[in-house]
Amino acid sequence: MAILKLENSAVVLTLRAVTDTDDLLVEQVRDIIRESRFIIFNIKGITFTTILIGDIINVLNLFEEHWKDRSHRMMFVQADPTAKRIFDLTKLSKKIPVYDSVDDAIGDLPPVL
């Protein structure tokens, strides 16, 4: 996973293909969740498995619990049509907005106070 930290307290994480032997996504991003109220997942080229969807739900739950009293947002960028369909079917798109690009996601962030 590649990490890019932006000045407006957003972090862009580029996911890579996930295998059964990888650490759970929540373990990989736990420290980032504690530090960043805005997390953008670049999911270009990612194939979504039930394991990855479960990981994303766990990350979302941890993220929302940690930032429940402050403005926060988790976002996906560069989702292909299949991923968008999966997000719609699983209702993840209601919790995690999907944008075409990192710039679009950043442009939709609230001002940092």
Image (cartoon, helix red, strand yellow):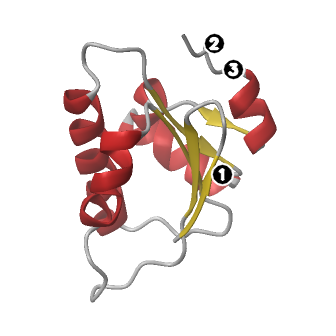
**Residue beneath the point at 78% across and 32% down:** 104
Q: Are marks 2 and 3 in contact (CB under 8 Å)?
A: no
For residue 60, the mark is none
- Name the secondary structure under disc 3: loop
- Judged by depth in the image, the label closer to the viewer, 2 or 3, is 2
Look at label 3 and name its amino acid: Asp
Q: Can you give x and y, in whole percent of width and height, for residue 63 in the image?
A: 29, 37
Quarter of the image holding residue 24?
Answer: bottom left
The residue lying toward the viewer, choosing from 34 and 79, is 34
Dot 3 crowding, Cα within 10 Å, few <14, some 14–19, many 20+: few
Look at label 1 and name its amino acid: Ala
Distance from Cα at disc 1 to Cα at disc 2? 25 Å
**Residue beneath the point at 27% across and 54% down:** 30
Quarter of the image holding residue 37?
Answer: top left
Of marks 1 and 2, which one's residue comes earlier in the chain?
A: 1
Q: Which residue is mark 1?
A: 79
Q: 19 above or below 11?
A: below
Quarter of the image holding residue 15?
Answer: bottom right
Q: How many marks?
A: 3
Q: Which residue is mark 2?
A: 111
Q: Are marks 1 and 2 in contact (CB under 8 Å)?
A: no
Q: Can you give x and y, in whole percent of width and height, for residue 28 in the image?
A: 33, 66
Distance from Cα at disc 2 to Cα at disc 3? 9 Å
Q: Can you give x and y, in whole percent of width and height, for residue 23 in the image?
A: 26, 77
